[in-house]
Image (spheres, rainbow, N blue to C red):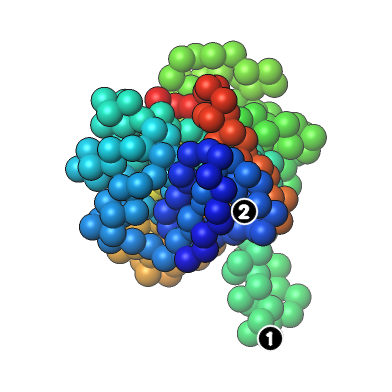
Amino acid sequence: MTTATNHAGRRIVYLDEPTYITAGFLARLAALGPVKVHYDRPTPAETTHRLAEADIVIVEWTALTRAILQEARHLRHIATVLSATDQVDLSAAREFGITVSHCPGYSVAAVADHIMACSGALRRRLLPAHAAGSSGIQHSYVPYLGREPRGLVLGLLGTGRIGRAVAAIAAQHGVRVIGTNRSGTRVPGVDIVPLAELVRHSDILSVQVPATPTNRHLLSADFIDELRPGAVVVSVSRHAVIDTEALLRRHRTGTLGGVALDDAPIELVPALAAVANTLLTPGTAWYTERARQENLHEVLGNVRSHLTGGRRNVVT
């Protein structure tokens, strides 16, 4: 636990085990008020204790439930380190007069890069080809026939910041980009289509939508059954967005070109990993040197904004 003393501002608590933190970030944060950083993941009881004296909390891992927020008498702002806010009961925060900010911009380029890298690995069947090469097989071609991006159709399930960044990269490689969003909002360089049409026409389906209650199993079993033969599926969303059991069943038939998930249900990981041309990553789509630095910059900006009466990246 690290404490920096400066009594000019509000009490700031970094609640739980920072993935990445620097002395420079802590110094700039301490200029805004007394800072206490905790390097573990607290129990609910310990979380309640840590929030008892906090005016501002920075949170990365811990679920902030209604019961916990109700006891946080002094808490006025929650700054999540993530782009997601599903670890915070937003309704309770709103009820208790606590604003919540998130970090929507720091990892856009990194996640788009991850999506395109996964797409390329799956399209070129690099995983099974690597297994073959590692076992001593040489000059074997037929099982590892790949597909170049030119002329393919990329479908974006979600056309926010990440989707648009993916579209911009794909366009440089001669890929036609289609997409779907709930509002039907027009997006430059993207043909907006209904979800049913998206899944039927995508050679590469890229999933990047938040895990909200309305998005649960947005990519349903029915839509998964409609995916065209040879389609590659890449998701950087929480696994709740996809009916992963249905995706596994379809993938096992051998009719998909490959599946890459950055968040898979733990109970399905062994079964998914056993299917050829499956790429599972442990939530690292965002994790680059640049994104780590920009994440700290975004968190700091959100806290500063709150202290000056602003609403930078505030969701409630």
Residue found farthest to the front: 7
Residue 74's image quarter? Answer: top left
Residue picked out by circle 1? 136
Considering only vertical position in the picture, is 281 above or below 13? Answer: below
Q: Are marks 2 and 1 in contact (CB under 8 Å)?
A: no
Pick whichever, 99 or 166, lies toward us.
99
Query: Residue 170: image x %, image y %?
Result: 71, 36
Query: Residue 274: image x %, image y %?
Result: 43, 69
Residue 92's image quarter? Answer: top left
Q: Which residue is pictured at 30% across the width and 47% down the height?
A: 52
Pick whichever, 233 or 237, lies toward us.
237
**Which amino acid type is shown beneath numbered disc 1?**
Gly
Residue picked out by circle 2? 26
**Which amino acid type is shown beneath numbered disc 2?**
Leu
Q: Secondary structure at mark 1?
A: loop
Pick whichever, 153 or 20, lies toward us.
20
Report whether 128 appears left or right of 239: right
